[in-house]
Image (cartoon, rainbow, N blue to C red):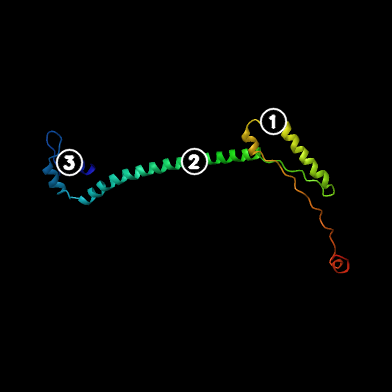
Amino acid sequence: YRPIYNNINKGILSKNSDNKIDFSEAIRVFGEPSRKQDVKNPVKIDSPSSTEVLLLRQQIDMLKNQLTDAKDRESFYQNQIEIMQRLLEAPKPNITPPSEPETAQSSPVTEAKEDVIAMPPKEPEVIENKRIPVPEQAEPEPVKRGFLSRFFLPNG
């Protein structure tokens, strides 16, 4: 706008009584306007694609939010599973020294019977799913012998 006012003040460009510039006067001073169709075409092409880009970005943001929600849900469920597994851990069987194999076999069996008698079944499914620990039978370990005793002692 500055060159127009400068040209009016210098007297190169004239305006009418309505303070408007005649179009033919502007063409005389500044020349024919050049046609730039190349500029208009990319603008038309860009506007639909810019809306597509905007929609796709909104969709990406929405999907990112859904992904973070799913990850939070998954971590919550993993924590719940770990808590339940800790609560449902099977009791460890009592391991006794191998010198008393008879007492080791009889005591866990009586303890298991006492557990069954002490706790009446609430539902039939609980009895089916309940794990009863089976005591492992400990075999006495053979006496360790040296290398040369294998050759000189009997049963070697």
Closer to the chain start, of discs 3 and 1, is 3
Tell me how far mark 1 sits from mark 2, CA to CA: 42 Å
**Residue at image mark 3:** 8
Where is residue 2, by image quadrant?
A: top left
Tell me how far mark 3 sits from mark 1, CA to CA: 108 Å
Q: Which mark is residue 15?
A: none
Tell me if mark 1 has few (under 14), some (14-19) or many (20+) residues whose alpha carbon lies within 10 angstroms of its own: few
Tell me how far mark 2 sits from mark 3, CA to CA: 68 Å
Q: Secondary structure at mark 1?
A: loop
- 58 sits to left or right of 19: right
Which residue shows up at 22% across the image and 51% down it? 38
- 124 sits to left or right of 33: right
Where is residue 77, by image quadrant?
A: top right
The C terminus sits in image quarter:
bottom right
Q: Secondary structure at mark 2?
A: helix
Closer to the chain start, of discs 2 and 3, is 3
As shown in the figure, which amino acid type bears the numbered disc 2? Ala
**Residue at image mark 2:** 70
Closer to the chain start, of discs 1 and 2, is 2
**Residue at image mark 1:** 120
As shown in the figure, which amino acid type bears the numbered disc 3? Ile
As shown in the figure, which amino acid type bears the numbered disc 1? Pro
Q: Nearer the viewer, mark 3 or mark 1?
A: 1
